[in-house]
Amino acid sequence: VLLRLNLSRRRWEWDEEKIQSMKIPDDVADFLTNSIGRLPPDVQAALSTLSCFGASTHMTVIQVLEAGLDLRLKDSLEVAVTEGLLEKTDDTFQFSHDRVQEAAYNTLNSQDRR
């Protein structure tokens, strides 16, 4: 356990050695990029595709993309929802934070960004 509440002492306690030994990126962008990189390739591709369309994308656009690109984006985006990277409201997928969208976009190579 890295951090725990000690009720008898009425304070938080932590294991500094364990925390120091963890490989935690220094900034949020690296952390999010690494998190996306650990997802299955189809989920990574879906997130990077979605990132090109802004902070939120309506299901109609996703259906057009699925038909035009012959991809199953919706299923992959649902995985990203369970991972906390996207939120789904009615018929719209929305990045949970602008930094998540930025990290997903940054996974695209420069040729795909055009």
Image (cartoon, helix red, strand yellow):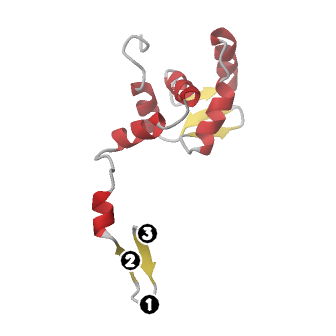
Three-letter amino acid code at disc 2?
Trp
Residue nearest the viewer, comparing 43 with 40: 40
- Name the residue located 55 percent from the left edge and 32 percent from the top edge: 40
Which mark lies nearer to you, 1 or 3? Answer: 3
The image quadrant that residue 71 belongs to is: top right
Which secondary structure lies at badge 1? loop
Which secondary structure lies at badge 3? loop
Query: Badge 3: how crowded within 10 Å, few (<14), some, or many (20+)?
Result: few
**Distance CA(mark 3)–CA(mark 2):** 12 Å
In the rendered structure, find residue 8 and report the number of the disc placed on it.
Answer: 1
* Rendered location of residue 84, percent (x, y): 56, 45
Three-letter amino acid code at disc 1?
Ser
- Name the residue located 47 percent from the left edge and 41 percent from the top edge: 97
- Name the residue located 64 percent from the left edge and 15 percent from the top edge: 65
Callouts 1 and 3 close, C-beta under 8 Å:
no
**Distance CA(mark 2)–CA(mark 1):** 11 Å
Q: Tell me which numbered mark, 1 or 3, is placed earlier along the sequence.
A: 3
In the rendered structure, find residue 12 and report the number of the disc placed on it.
Answer: 2
Which mark lies nearer to you, 3 or 2? Answer: 3
